[in-house]
Image (cartoon, helix red, strand yellow):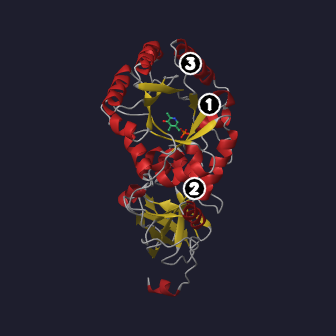
Amino acid sequence: MSALAAEPTVGSPMSSVRSGARSGPRLEIDLAAVAANTRLLADRAAGELMAVVKADGFGHGTVDVARTALAHGASSLGVTSIEEALALRCAGLQEPILSWLNPVDADFASALGADVDLAVPTALHLQAVAAAAARTRRTARVHLHLDTGMARDGSSPDAWSALCARARRAERAGLVSVVGVMGHLGCAEVAGDPRTDAGLRTFRWGLEVAHATGLRPSLRHLAATAATLTEPRTHLDLCRVGAGLVGIDPSGTTPLRGALTLTAPVVSVRRVAAGTGVGYGHTHVTDRPTRLVLLPLGYADGLPRATSGRAEVLLRGRRRPIVGRVSMDQIVVDVGDDRVAIGETAVVLGPGDRGEPTATEWAAWADTIPHEIVTGIGPRVGRVVSATSSLHHQLRSL
Ligand SMILES: *Cc1c(COP(=O)(O)O)cnc(C)c1O
């Protein structure tokens, strides 16, 4: 190692970022990218845009993504749980929020107290929401949720007319107001998929049933990111987009910008001989003398172990293979003859414009989708909101 001490240190590509408290792996969140993606999606949507900020804003920070999206074209927020909705209210956000996935014993009273709209998929949920409304002397704003072909959340079409009739009775009793009807499409990545037609037909039928029951929902919504980009017929009054805000386009049709950059400092560099086994199980054995670099992040930080033997990072402007198994806390990168120095910064993941791997590439290496990569970055990675965006953010909150 003493021979390495004299090697020059190249400036970190991330040196323009405010230095965070931590010196280890760092996740930079580029809210300017979220803003640009939001503007593009709001422009495409025929009606309104709901920013879906579930799962910590797809791993980008719920409140930061929510504020940014609302400032750039979204008019409401969507989350799964009531807890996520209440956290947004606690942060001071006053725009409409819809929560759509709750167990029947969820704290509906708190949701009503915080003016949170609730999706209702079953008669039992309706009963629980109506009871909470009676108890708190409020009228619950509900969106009846119809399963439009995923066999997942939402009322089965069989139970739909009974659910509409019950909702209408609760409306007459002043307990609920049916402001919306929602569905969700499972196959909208490709325009014109016949399963999207089927979903749309089911949804139109559901709206007719609701109307015949006397319901007058003003928010009819079916499209998520993929359908927003591929199927204008599905836009109706509102598009609910999550992935697209953070730069993920499931349809592969639209240039959206990734908003995360994950970097890690080189902890150590070692020269090794040919025939050196690397990491657990020696799944990699060097075939020549080379330099191996250690980066302090692993599968606990969101780099899937399944990418072992495939993944790469960007270091000194070039792609370098991660060799051996991805460990819980560390990875080893082969830099060949390059005299990489301790303290240099590797770009593990980013929007891709400097040649670094993207979330989509990491997803391909792990045989998954980019959504799972961006929502999987672990809690011990230091988070930094990028300088321009945080300035913008500070100005907004003045
Ligand atoms: C997550 C989710 C969305 C957002 O989907 P994206 O593809 O991320 O835009 C919309 N609607 C429902 C019901 C969801 O669960």
Q: Position of residue 260 (x, y in %)?
A: 54, 57
Q: Which amino acid does label 3 sit on?
A: Leu
- Structural distance between the alpha carbons of marks 3 and 2: 37 Å
- Structural distance between the alpha carbons of marks 1 and 2: 27 Å
Element type at marker 1?
Answer: loop
Q: Nearer the viewer, residue 192 or 275?
A: 192
Q: Where is residue 216 in the image (x, y as percent from the top left)?
A: 55, 21
* Residue under numbered circle 2: 259
First in sequence: mark 3 vs mark 2: 3
Q: Residue at image x 61%, y 36%?
A: 226
Mark 3 crowd level (few <14, some 14–19, many ≥20, 10 Å Cα): many
Q: Which of the two marks, 1 or 2, is nearer to us in this view?
A: 1
The image quadrant of residue 382 is bottom left
* Residue under numbered circle 1: 237
Q: Which amino acid does label 1 sit on?
A: Asp
Q: Where is residue 126 in the image (x, y as percent from the top left)?
A: 38, 24
Q: What residue type is labelled 2?
A: Ala
Element type at marker 2?
Answer: loop
Q: Do the residues labelled 3 and 1 touch (CB within 8 Å)?
A: no
- Structural distance between the alpha carbons of marks 3 and 1: 13 Å
Ligand 1 near label 2 (Cβ, under 8 Å)?
Answer: no
* Residue under numbered circle 3: 207
The image quadrant of residue 119 is top left
Does residue 375 sit above or below 210 in this rendering? below
